[in-house]
Structure formats: structure tokens, C-alpha cells
Amino acid sequence: MKLLVQKGRIIDPVTGIGGQMDLLIENGILSLIASEIREPDAVHLDASGLMVCAGLVDIHVHLRDPGFTYKEDLFSGGQAAAKGGFTSIACMPNTKPTIDSPARVTELKNRAAEIQTVQIYPIASVSRGQLGREITQAEELRRAGAVALSDDGMPVSSANLMRDALICAKSAGLPILSHCEDASMVEGRAVNEGRISRRLGLPGRPAIAEEIMVMRDIMLAAETGSPVHICHVSTRGSVELIRNAKKQGIPVTCETCPHYFTLTEEEILTQGSMAKVNPPLRTLRDVQAIIEGLQDDTIDVIATDHAPHAAKEKTLPLIEAPSGISGLETALGVTLTALYHTGKLGLSHILQKMTANPALILGIPKGRLAIGAPGDLTLFHPTERWEVRAEDFVSKGKNTPFHGQTLTGKVKYTILGGKIVYQDS
Ligand code: DOR
């Protein structure tokens, strides 16, 4: 099976390959990149006018399977990933049951292998049942196929447990992806602490609740020498702490999500629970700091934190509604619109944070265009405009605060192992 992608504009931040070229994928592997390839027996795909990059990699996705398949399942999440241009996704373990044992990782991996549209990499939990009391078995989890450990959604409260977990994760060769919010400061609170929370008369989730945990994890990473990856950075203070830690050579990496560099807490006033997410949307100053963090590489990764929920849940009153945004199908468009088309970040820089960097952190052989690499590609039109319509999402989660927005930049084809798994109609 051969696929020849012709006349696209190739862009690869790692190898520096660029310009109009053809790519040949044979038996799932990228076998040739050249200015003009003749291969009569290959399937031909005309990529004129399109950008061609390595398939996007998302380090932070909630697939809700098993246990909450009314919100999403491996199949629907896989469809949403492909539509968003993602060929590799790492899925969080806050399912029912929690993915906290080698047997559960193996079971998930086997079911994920059936999904044709995306490669799914399991993340196992840091603590059993994500209860924060007892660490899981990092080495066995890695051998079963886990690519990282995380209690995302249920931050690890005990510094002692986090310390033990970091030490074990390091010897197993797994990164810990840490959701940084001090539970005692955020429980039962729906919005950022500040102007909007005061206006609504609600207790808020303060920036310090995130920053205190970021600081703790940086200190633990420094002490143990174990890499820690901070999830969904949302505050100016967190960016500053991570910037300083990196300067000192502490092994910390981090991600942010499109909603943290585009939206502020004001969205709550018009969108209610559609804009409810953990950590919460912050202020314009925070948004600006997140963009600066992306520019100077304090922030390594743009992830989605794809968190689908059912419509009936998101229409509950603000306090009761679950937190999260369905992000796979809008991530590239929102990012190109907000960062590339405004001149804030170059295309190669953006793609590095959506391909090579997350792949490197997860230790998976993805995210680059090179001979011998997997034949995973994303083809997008950089200037095509389109309107986000939640009802058009293939994800079961239609919960997006970007509904109605016009974005510039659209995924046209997603190719996984040389097979076209998504084509824009
Ligand atoms: O808003 C969020 N939703 N943040 C998280 O960390 C978890 C996620 C979820 O699982 O719904």
C-alpha cells in the first residue's frame, strides 16, 4: 500500500524540511521526501495549496471510556481526533474504573488498537483510584503500555505521595503529568477568583491555588531529579515559576490549551457553564503571559484537555455543571487564528508544540517528518475560514465556548500510517 502526497508545502520544525515537496508513504512508513516523486502504482493525493506536517500529537485527552461513554468513547473520540488533525493522543485515566493497574492498561490498549482513526496511548493514574492515598506500580504500568502517569482532574494533594510517585516514575522512565490546583482552595468553586466571581457573588478559584502546586511540583522535581510535566498552565504566576525553574535546569515541562490563550473569565458572563473549565479561564494579563510563555518556550506544548460532557450536564446551574471543554476539533483552527494569523507565533513554532514536543515528553516515536518515521500526516489549509458549529462536532461532547466563532485555518486531511482517516468534505 503506497500513498503519494503531492505538491504540498511541507513544514517540519525538527528536521527543518520546508517548501513544496512530495512525500511517499509505503507500508505505513514515510519512505521518501523529494521535490518530485513518480510512483505510478501509489494512491495520489493532491495537496496543492495545503500545508503538510507530521500528524498532530495531543498529550492531554479525556476519552471517558470505560465508564462514561455517554460523554465520549474510544470510537467517537477517535473520530474527533482525526477531524482535528490529531494522529496520536494520550488519554487520561479518570474513567470508571480508573486506569490504575497493568490489567486495565492492557485492556484499554487492546480496545484502542481496534480504533482505525487515531493511535491512542494510555496514561495510567499516579494513585490507586486517583484517591491520592497509595501510589500505583509505575514499572508494571509502563510494561503494560502506559506512556505517562497522571491524576488529572483529581490533583495529588499529598506532597509525600507525589514525591514517592516521582521517584518511582523516574526509575520506570515515565513522566508525571500534574494537574496543579490545591484541592482545599478550589473545591466547589466554579470560576476564577476576581472581578467576575465578586460580581456573581461566588467564591472563586484563586490563581495561587494553581501556583502553589506548580511551585511544590517544581521543588519536588528539583529534589528528586524526576521530570514533571505541568498540565494546562493558566496563570501569569505559573508561567513565571516555570520560566525560572527551567533557567535553573530543573526538569519541568508544561502545556497550555487554546482556551487559555484566547478566552478570559468574562466568558462566564455570556456563556455560563460552557466556559467552565479547570483550571478556570483567567484574566487578560494571564492570557498575555501565556502567549509570552509560548513565545519564549517556557510553555512546551499546546494540548487540548479535550473534556467532553453531555448536553444535559452542561445545562445544569454553573456550580453543579461539570468542568471542561470539548477541544479536539477546534484546537488547530483556534491556535492558527489566535497565534499564527496575528503574528504572535510562527507556523513551525506552533507545530513544534503540537507535534514534536508532546511526542518527546511522552517518549513516543511520533511528531516528525523524517524518512523511516511513521506515515502520520496532517494536511491543513492555512487561510480557509470556517465557522465553529457545535452541532457539527463528531465528538459526543458538544461543549465548546468557541461555537459561532469564525476561525482561519482548517484541517483538510488526516493520514494515519499511510491511510486517509479523515477528509474534509
Ligand atoms: O475542566 C476539566 N475537565 N479539567 C480537568 O482537569 C478534568 C476535566 C474532566 O475530566 O472533565
Image (spheres, rainbow, N blue to C red):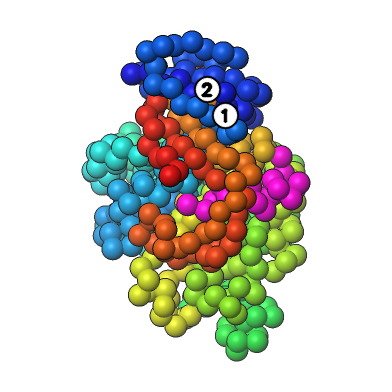
Q: Quadrant of the N terminus?
A: top left
The region drawn magenta spans: 329-346
For the residue carrying disc 2, how many other residues have a C-alpha within 10 Å: few (<14), some (14-19), or many (20+)? many
Determine which of the numbered discs, if any, sits on residue 6 in the image.
Answer: 2
Q: Tell me if 218 is positioned left or right of 112 in this view.
A: right
C-beta proximity under 8 Å, tags 2 and 1? yes
Q: CA distance from mark 2 to mark 1?
A: 7 Å
Could you tell me the amino acid type at mark 2? Gln
Residue 276 drawn at (x, y percent): 52, 71
Residue 50 drawn at (x, y percent): 58, 34
Circle 2: element type? strand
Label 2 beta carbon less than 8 Å to ligand 1: no
367 or 339: nearer the viewer: 339
Work out whether 289 lies above or below 226.
below
Q: Is residue 359 magenta?
A: no
Circle 1: element type? loop
Q: Is residue 232 visible?
A: no
Could you tell me the amino acid type at mark 1? Ser
Q: Quadrant of the C terminus?
A: top left
Determine which of the numbered discs, if any, sits on residue 80 in the image.
Answer: none
Q: Tell me if 289 is positioned left or right of 424 in this view.
A: right
Name which residue lies at 40% across and 50% down.
80
Q: Is residue 341 magenta?
A: yes
Q: Tell me if 188 is positioned left or right of 238 in this view.
A: left
Name which residue lies at 56% across and 53% down.
386
